[in-house]
Amino acid sequence: MPRTIRALTIGGFAAIPSFHWFNLLARSFASLPRWSGLAARVATHQVVFAPVFNTYFFFSQAVLSGATVAEGIERVRTALYTSLVNSVRVWPPIMFINFAFVPRELWSVMPGFVAVGWQCYLSFLNQRAARLLEDRKQEVQA
């Protein structure tokens, strides 16, 4: 239950900024031809949003579960790379479909549904990183 509450808190605090992010993307690259603008939006989303959100997710999960700021930073260092590699596999096709075929006013909706599964995956990575860091701490103490 505490993990669920943390996930809801993290998702809740990300919802409004995510909505504004999609509005910003809608206004950005509007002067480009359709496919160039689409490619620019997908690339910008992947290069800017993915690292920011994933960092926020891992750090918030750590701190909300009682870790120190230093432990939160270490959790980010441990899990972020894997999340970004796999993010490239998941999000560009989703965002391409979203930007190409979904009406602009609904651009934050479809990724919001996919984000539920993505956050489950990030939660798995977060727990794996927490266990890895705990194992390292115990090895140092021994």
Image (cartoon, rainbow, N blue to C red):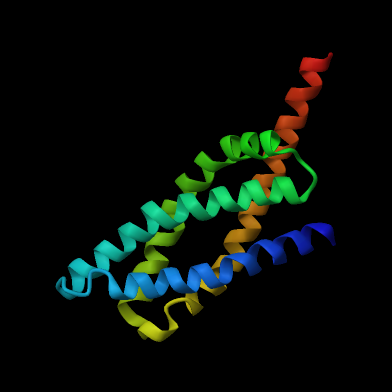
Residue found at x 36% / y 86%: 103
Decide which of 70, 88 is in the foreground and name it.
70
Drawn side of residue 8 relative to residue 41, left or right: right
Nearest the viewer among 88 and 64 is 64
Residue 101 sits in quarter: bottom left
The front one of 55 and 130 is 55
Q: Residue at x 75, y 51 (%)?
A: 64
Q: Picture quarter containing residue 96?
A: bottom left
Q: Residue furthest top?
A: 142
- Say left or right for 32 vs 98: left
Q: Percent from the top left, x then y, of residue 141?
A: 82, 16
**Across the whole image, how many numbered discs are drawn on residues?**
0
Residue 14 pos. (x, y %) = 58, 65
Q: What residue do we see at 70% from left, 35% from top? A: 71
Side of 110 where 61 appears, left or right: right
Residue 36 coordinates in the image, percent (x, y): 18, 66
Give the quarter of the figure containing the N terminus: bottom right
Figure check: 85 above or below 78:
below
Residue at point 67%, 33% (across, down): 70
Q: Is residue 105 above or below residue 44?
A: below
Horizontally, residue 8 falls left or right of residue 105, namely right
In the image, farthest residue toward the front: 69
Image location (x, y in percent) of residue 33? 14, 73
Quarter of the picture containing the C terminus is top right
